[in-house]
Structure formats: C-alpha cells, structure tokens
Amino acid sequence: MPVKTLLNGNAPPGTVPVKIYAEDIEPAALQQLKNIAQLPIVHSHIAAMPDVHLGKGATVGSVIPTVSAIIPAAVGVDIGCGMNAVRTSLFAHQLPDNLRALRDAIEVKVPVGQRRHKLISARESACKNLAPGVDRLFSKHPGLMKKLRQPQKTWVTQMGTLGGGNHFIELCLDESGAVWVMLHSGSRGIGNAIGQYFIQKARRDMSGHMHNLPDKDLAYFSEGCENFEEYIEAVNWAQEYARLNRQEMMKLVLACLRVQLPAFTLTSEAINCHHNYVVRENHFARDVFVTRKGAISAQRDQLGIIPGSMGAKSFVVRGLGNPESFCSCAHGAGRKMSRSAARQRFSRRDLEEQTRGIQCRKDSGVLDEIPAAYKDIDTVMENQSDLVEVVHTLRQVVCIKG
C-alpha cells in the first residue's frame, strides 16, 4: 500500500509531516499525531503504523524521531513491552487432543495477572545484574519507591511473570504444523512506576512552558538536563528488565512443556523484540532518539513478531528496512474499540464463538480482549507490505492470559 502523507495544512510553522500506513484512523488518534508533529524536537516526520490507535499523549502505533529530547509519555508506562518466540521440533500430531491440562500446567508454572513468584530467591539469578541499577534509581529517586506502593523486592518476584491486559503466552502452529511458543509481556509493575514517575517529572520540568504544548502529556526532557540522563538510565534499565522477564518466562514455559510433551529441541534462535521503547539511531542524516510506541524495529533482514488477537493468526516477519517508516512496522493488530466498549458490546457467547478451537479463558474477565475488539490482522499486514515480508504464519492452539 502506498504511504499516505498528512501535511497538516493549517498547522504552525515547523510542523513536520505525518506519514500514515493505515487506511482508516480514528479522529482522536489523528489529532494526537498532529499534536506531536507540532513539537520543535521532532525530526523529518512521524510514521503511523497500520495498527495505529488512540493512546495516552502519543498514539499507539507511532514512530517518533526526536532531536536531543525524549517524551516519556510517548515511551509510555509499559516500558520495554514486547514479544518472544521460539520454534520447537514438535509437530501438531505430537500434542494431546485435549490441551486443557497443558494450559493449566503452564499457568501453575508462570504466575499470571496480579500473581507473582512467592520467594524472592525464585528469580534472583535473572535479577542479580539488574540489582545495582535499581538500587541507584531508588537512592536517587525516593519518590519512585513511593510510586511503587509495594515492597522494594517486588520487582524480583515479578521477574518471570505475565501480568494481565493484552499480555499472553501462546502455543502456535506454523504452516508446516511445527509448534511454536510465543509470549508477550513487559517490565511489569516497576516499569509502570518508572514511566509514571518520569512523566510527572517532565510535566514539572516544563511547567513554565506547558502553554506551548498542544497536550500536557507531550512534556519532554531535553538532552543535557539532569532528568534527561536520569530518565535514560531508568528507561534502559526497564527495557532490559522487560527483555529478561520474557526470557525467564520462556524458560519456565519450555520446562513445563518438557514434562508434558515428548522430548524436543529448539529449531530456531529466539526472537525477542521490544515494541514500547526508545533507542538512539540515525535517520535522514541525523542522530535521533527513536520512540517506537506500539511498533517494532524492522531493519533489513531483522526478524520480528506481529501477533493478532486471541483467536486470530500471528506472523513472524523479516524487515525490509524501509527508511520512510524509520525501519519500523506494526506491533500487532491494534485495538479498534476501548476495553469498556468491548465489555458492553460483546457477551461470553461471542467470546466462545470467536475463540472456537483455541484452549483459552472464555469468561467475562477477558471479554475486553475478544478478537472483534481488534483490527483485522490481515488488513494490517496488507498495509505494511512495504515494511516487512512474512516468514511464518502462526495460528494459536493455546492462549493464556492474566
């Protein structure tokens, strides 16, 4: 699909274009993109991915390059949220006919929702390299500790846990019938606390300039100020925590499968990609901070994961390195209605029908995650044919949510 370019016709001088890879975009999300495009720190243009939808401050499904500045609300509060997937040597015929026992076993092994590991030592080996960084954060920012509203070591017991919302663990089959393990999670409670803490700090830092912002959630840190460096350190820590959290969960799931299923090996290197994060990159002859909020890196030949909703197929993709998207692509199907709207519109019967054939929760507690609340994943993929090519198509057979 040819990229559409929004020029912001009557926008203030200095406003950059917004390049959109979607056929339809809700007016409120479009306004958010226009707001970001007015910021003097944005370089070249903004790219909106095919799964673009309304977010807090910044649009989910947007790629924002900034010069010597970062917008904490654009990075968001689920810092480092992303995907992890591996292919096993198992095939569909080696799975049991009834997958409920397998789903139950994984839910015992990996805490979901608000649950966490009971012992601090449970995941300590995965956290030992992170401990010095978080100790520095707490010592420099006692207000962050208050933000957590929980014991200091909760971040350790949450290592290797799923959380709730749209986070999931899935068993999938590819086009050959090979079994994949795929999961989606982030930096858990501590990442959320870091995000909220620094969003508020950015607002205070810009308190005298808020009238110049189209949205108070677009307050930013400028490079060179103390809080900028503190935020960089904190966000890098949270991104690493999120990566290790997924890695630890994957170990736990695979250990569970080794008990429940025939012996197997892993036949592909693990794919581990963030989709809520900020990173230094060079685009259009400028070193910039690239914030991908609900988008993944799609550098040429880089592998990534684009999940559909529970009940829809997902994709392993290879990046095409498209410079107009800042070498990025969509992070998933993207919501087309709010969680409250989904709960009001659909029933448990709808959920059962839309997840037929998949071993997953089918109760009212996950009604807001019903497939119909999300955009059509095939349309999303069609709209980014210039950004990625499909390597594998996966369909879920087990989906675990918090």
Image (cartoon, rainbow, N blue to C red):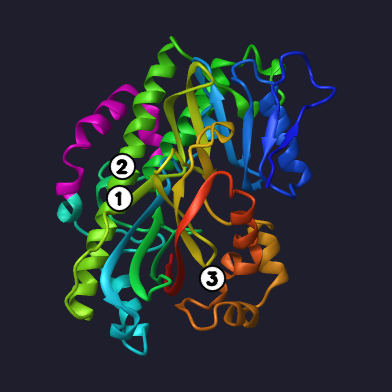
Q: In the image shown, does 352 or 120 lie closer to the viewer?
A: 352
Q: Secondary structure at mark 2?
A: helix
The answer to whether one can see residue 17 in this image is: yes
Lateral position of residue 215 relative to residue 334, left or right? right
Callout in the foreground (2, 3):
2
Q: Position of residue 240 (x, y in %)?
A: 31, 39
Q: CA distance from mark 2 to mark 1?
A: 6 Å
Q: In the image shown, does 19 or 74 lie closer to the viewer?
A: 19
Which residue position holds label 2? 241
**CB atoms of marks 2 and 1 within 8 Å:** yes
Which residue position holds label 3? 365
Q: In the image shown, does 36 or 234 lie closer to the viewer?
A: 36
Which residue position holds label 1? 245
Q: Main secondary structure of the magenta part?
A: helix
Q: Position of residue 356 (x, y in %)?
A: 54, 82
Q: Secondary structure at mark 1?
A: helix
Residue at x 66% of width, y 18% of height? 210
Q: CA distance from mark 3 to mark 1?
A: 24 Å
